[in-house]
Image: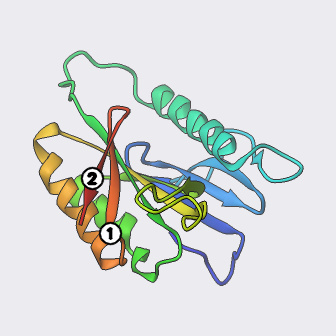
């Protein structure tokens, strides 16, 4: 879901592995919502000057969705257990090429989580200190849980997106370990 002209303050922030629940922004807060019934599955978690930082609010809303999902789906030992690997990559927010990325990841890999407003800082160590200022970007983190056999496909997606956005490299995190891949 994207910003709506009728509900400008309402935006869906993540969908996929928590479907039919999603994290929805309402004003300066986030809430877990059942997309099928429209019911909230927890309180509105405020972020900003009067509340939590965005990541903490997102995490609490995600936990509300996961709790509701667990309550909806009792554990059934007859169902297979899938061993999925979680991959994340970061792309600066400044690019128009990010339109449709979440939809593409969901179509290709079955779902994704999107986190906005992540601050990234770095310094180019190849330049002398007096030439290389501290760099800052606002980033979007895309996270996909998929079978490890699809790792190469996900890396091709992330590096292709980074290249389309004009980036020279992309960080891809797998199980807490990050790799930088030059595109």
Please tell me which residue lies in front, 88 or 2: 88
Residue occupied by mark 1? 168
Query: Can you say whether 52 is above or below 166 in the image?
Result: above
Residue occupied by mark 2? 110
Looking at the picture, how far across and down is residue 77, in whole percent?
A: 24, 15
Query: Can you say whether 158 is above or below 43 in the image?
Result: below
Identify the image quadrant of residue 60. Answer: top right
Please tell me which residue lies in front, 89 or 130: 130
Left or right of 123? Residue 78 is left
Which residue appears at 45% of the width and 55% of the height? 125
Which residue appears at 21% of the width and 60% of the height? 108
Which residue appears at 55% of the width and 68% of the height? 131
CB under 8 Å between callouts 1 and 2? no
C-alpha distance separating marks 1 and 2: 28 Å
Q: Earlier along the polypeptide chain: callout 1 or callout 2?
A: 2
Left or right of 70? Residue 34 is right
Query: Secondary structure under badge 1?
Result: loop
Left or right of 28? Residue 119 is left
Q: Residues within 10 Å of mark 1 (few under 14, many from 20)?
A: few
Looking at the picture, how far across and down is residue 148, in whole percent?
A: 16, 38
Query: Secondary structure under badge 2?
Result: loop
Q: Where residue 72 is drawn, which disc sits there?
A: none
Query: Can you say whether 136 is above or below 22 in the image?
Result: below
Which residue appears at 87% of the width and 52% of the height? 49
Image quarter of the C terminus: bottom left
Please tell me which residue lies in front, 176 or 8: 176
Looking at the picture, how far across and down is residue 91, in whole percent?
A: 43, 63
* Tally of marks: 2
Instruction: For marks 1 and 2, give the one nearer the viewer.
Output: 1
Query: Can you say whether 174 is above or below 166 in the image?
Result: above
């Amino acid at each position: 879901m994207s910003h709506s002209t009728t509900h400008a303050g309402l935006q869906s922030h993540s969908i996929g592995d928590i479907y039919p629940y999603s994290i929805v922004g309402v004003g300066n807060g986030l809430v877990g919502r059942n997309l099928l019934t429209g019911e909230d599955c927890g309180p509105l978690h405020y972020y900003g000057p009067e509340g939590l930082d965005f990541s903490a609010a997102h995490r609490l809303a995600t936990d509300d969705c996961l709790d509701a999902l667990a309550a909806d789906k009792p554990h059934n030992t007859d169902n297979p257990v899938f061993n999925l690997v979680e991959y994340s990559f970061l792309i600066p927010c400044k690019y128009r090429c990010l339109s449709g990325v979440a939809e593409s990841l969901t179509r290709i890999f079955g779902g994704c989580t999107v986190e906005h407003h992540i601050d990234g800082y770095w310094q180019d160590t190849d330049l002398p200190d007096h030439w290389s200022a501290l760099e800052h970007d606002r980033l979007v983190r895309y996270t996909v849980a998929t079978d490890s056999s699809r790792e190469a496909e996900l890396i091709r997606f992330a590096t292709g997106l980074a290249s389309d956005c004009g980036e020279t490299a992309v960080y891809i995190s797998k199980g807490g370990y990050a790799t930088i891949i030059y595109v």
